Image (cartoon, rainbow, N blue to C red):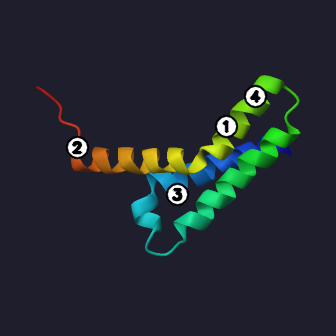
Amino acid sequence: DGPMMETAGAQCLLLAGFFEDQMRRRHNIRWYSQLGAGFYRRAASQERELAKARLLDTMARGFEAWRQRYARVSRELRDQPYRLKA
């Protein structure tokens, strides 16, 4: 099921990317990255709309780069907490 594969890919991206530091202690991040890319690849192969299939394929091919971006954003947000001005 294409939408289910797309959702699984997005969850792998969030977990292995944004929560990389927390997951690294117990899980193989590379495996989750490969798994997520595979989910996006399968979702692309089942998508009927050409534009969305291309998008999903692009996500599959660039999964590791996106995962690294998410990890960097997570670290930056943790290192520079929000400050509210009174």
Judging by the rendered image, the residue that carries numbered circle 3 is: 16
Horizontal side of residue 16 vs 7, given as left or right: left
Structural distance between the alpha carbons of marks 3 and 4: 23 Å
Q: Residues within 10 Å of mark 3 (few under 14, many from 20)?
A: many
Judging by the rendered image, the residue that carries numbered circle 2 is: 81
Q: What residue is rendered at 44% in x and 44% in y?
A: 69
Q: Residues within 10 Å of mark 4 (few under 14, many from 20)?
A: few
| Badge nearest the viewer, 2 or 4 | 4
Please say if the residues under marks 2 and 1 sit with CB atoms less than 8 Å apart.
no
Q: Amino acid at mark 4?
A: Lys
Q: Amino acid at mark 3?
A: Ala
Mark 4 falls on what kind of element?
A: helix
Q: What residue is rendered at 45% in x and 56% in y?
A: 19
Judging by the rendered image, the residue that carries numbered circle 4 is: 52
| Place of residue 70 in the rendered image (x, y in percent of width and height, measured from the top left) | 45, 46
Q: Amino acid at mark 2?
A: Pro
Structural distance between the alpha carbons of marks 2 and 4: 36 Å
Q: Nearer the viewer, residue 80 or 37?
A: 37
Structural distance between the alpha carbons of marks 4 and 1: 10 Å
| Badge nearest the viewer, 1 or 3 | 1
**Which label's residue is closer to the chain start, 2 or 3?**
3
- Please determine whether, in this image, residue 21 is positioned above or below residue 36: below
Judging by the rendered image, the residue that carries numbered circle 1 is: 58
Q: What residue is rendered at 72% in x and 39% in y?
A: 57
